[in-house]
Image (cartoon, grey):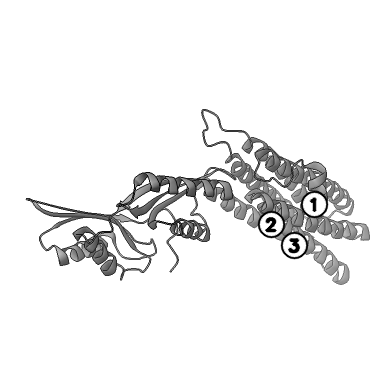
């Protein structure tokens, strides 16, 4: 079904890296979801009103909120696909994240209203009338939502959309919520217990939990969440695998929306070689990242002398002695200046954020290690906690 819909309604459906194709996928999923959720709301509203069941009505209102969410998602895809302009040189991709946040807020509002209706049902109980039609509508709703979950998840993973993956999770939650209502109706039918109000509260709580989870997921990229450590490690490995690269540090990754990622990194290479040659090497590496991953990456060339110098011996000494703090720590940008005023040492020391040692103690430790080689030297250390996840051990 997925391949049929994609081939039927999306031109060049295989080229998901194109903004127009990505928008077409988002539009297709959103329109299908709006239609399905709208029909489910109408069906549940009719049978819920006829039977006087607040739990079924609550489940129907949840579908209505989902339909509104799908409309917002569609708007988000459309706005995110707008090209960069003079005021927004990195494009408008974060509109998709804002759309996801709006969806989460709508879900929370629906959850509050569902909870209010359910409490009123407990305070002023009206026993709902069971009908096989109502049971059939709920069972059919579960089947439709299961299909929607699979469809949204498939497309979300194909085009790299967190919004659609979140929608898939919401559809899964709807299946569970509807299942709870259906099970409660069955229990009531068999035992005579009136669980309608309590089931409505359970559904409302589930909707609220889902809403809060979606708020967190959509806020994370807007606030600058730490990128996936595996992705960062993969980028590091690919840089280090490039011929001539001695080391890399200060990798930074910026997310301006799906398909709009930018990065920068310092790359250490032999100072004795021709800088023009290294420039060509790094330029080719940057092009590969763009072509294969859609990642715009900027490299800063850091020349490292391969000669047996006092500076290199100091770097090795610092790396060995300071590595006891954490094997992932690293020393870079080491400079040694000697003149009539004495010896001055300065360097950057990367220490993973998980290392629970006060900054003052780390600086004192670094100064002590420097003085092992230069007892009368001065030392200036820049602690680099990093913006990315630390390298794997």
Q: Is residue 50 above or below residue 24?
A: below
* Residue found at the very far top of the displayed protein: 86
Q: Is residue 259 above or below residue 387?
A: above
2 and 1 marks in contact (CB < 8 Å): no
Q: Which residue is mark 3?
A: 176
3 and 2 marks in contact (CB < 8 Å): no
Q: Closer to the camera: disc 1 or disc 3?
A: 1
Q: Residues within 10 Å of mark 1 (few under 14, many from 20)?
A: few
Residue 178 — which label? none
Pointer 1 or 3: first along the chain: 1
Q: Is residue 277 above or below residue 372?
A: above
Q: Which residue is mark 1?
A: 3
Q: Residues within 10 Å of mark 2 (few under 14, many from 20)?
A: some
Could you tell me residue 347's position as x and y percent?
26, 55
Could you tell me residue 104's position as x and y percent?
64, 48
Q: Which residue does the image show at 80% across and 56% down from the upper left?
A: 147
Q: Residues within 10 Å of mark 3 (few under 14, many from 20)?
A: some
Pointer 2 or 1: first along the chain: 1
Pointer 3 or 2: first along the chain: 2
Q: Which residue does the image show at 53% across and 42% down from the upper left?
A: 256
Left or right of 302 on screen, residue 149: right
Q: Which residue is mark 2?
A: 169
Left or right of 47 on screen, residue 60: left
- What whole-number distance in Å separates the C-alpha atoms at marks 3 and 2? 11 Å
Q: Is residue 141 above or below residue 323?
A: above
- What whole-number distance in Å separates the C-alpha atoms at marks 2 and 1? 21 Å
* Secondary element type, mark 3: helix
């Amino acid at each position: 079904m997925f391949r049929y819909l994609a081939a039927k309604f999306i031109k060049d459906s295989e080229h998901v890296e194109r903004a127009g194709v990505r928008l077409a996928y988002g539009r297709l999923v959103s329109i299908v979801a709006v239609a399905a959720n709208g029909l489910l709301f109408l069906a549940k509203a009719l049978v819920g009103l006829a039977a006087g069941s607040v739990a079924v009505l609550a489940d129907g209102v949840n579908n209505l909120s989902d339909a509104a969410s799908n409309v917002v998602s569609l708007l988000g895809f459309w706005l995110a696909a707008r090209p960069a302009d003079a005021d927004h040189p990195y494009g408008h991709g974060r509109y998709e994240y804002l759309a996801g946040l709006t969806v989460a807020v709508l879900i929370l509002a629906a959850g509050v209203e569902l909870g209010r209706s359910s409490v009123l049902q407990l305070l002023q109980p009206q026993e709902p009338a069971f009908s096989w039609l109502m049971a059939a509508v709920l069972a059919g709703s579960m089947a439709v939502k299961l299909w929607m979950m699979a469809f949204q998840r498939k497309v979300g993973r194909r085009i790299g959309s967190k919004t659609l993956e979140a929608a898939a999770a919401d559809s899964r939650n709807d299946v569970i919520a509807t299942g709870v209502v259906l099970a409660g109706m069955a229990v009531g039918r068999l035992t005579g217990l009136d669980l309608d109000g309590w089931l409505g509260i359970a559904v409302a709580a589930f909707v609220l939990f889902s809403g809060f989870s979606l708020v967190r997921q959509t806020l994370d990229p807007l606030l600058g969440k730490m990128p996936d450590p595996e992705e960062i490690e993969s980028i590091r490995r690919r840089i280090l695998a490039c011929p001539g690269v001695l080391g890399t540090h200060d990798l930074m990754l910026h997310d301006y929306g799906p398909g709009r990622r930018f990065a920068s990194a310092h790359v250490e290479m032999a100072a004795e070689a021709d800088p023009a040659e290294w420039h060509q090497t790094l330029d080719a590496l940057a092009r590969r990242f763009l072509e294969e991953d859609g990642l715009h990456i900027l490299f800063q060339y850091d020349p490292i002398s391969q000669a047996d110098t006092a500076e290199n011996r100091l770097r090795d000494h610092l790396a060995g002695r300071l590595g006891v703090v954490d094997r992932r720590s690293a020393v870079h940008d080491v400079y040694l200046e000697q003149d009539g005023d004495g010896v001055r040492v300065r360097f950057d020391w990367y220490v993973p954020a998980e290392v629970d040692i006060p900054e003052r103690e780390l600086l004192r430790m670094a100064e002590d290690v420097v003085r092992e080689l230069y007892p009368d030297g001065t030392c200036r250390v820049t602690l680099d906690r990093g913006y990315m996840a630390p390298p794997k051990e």
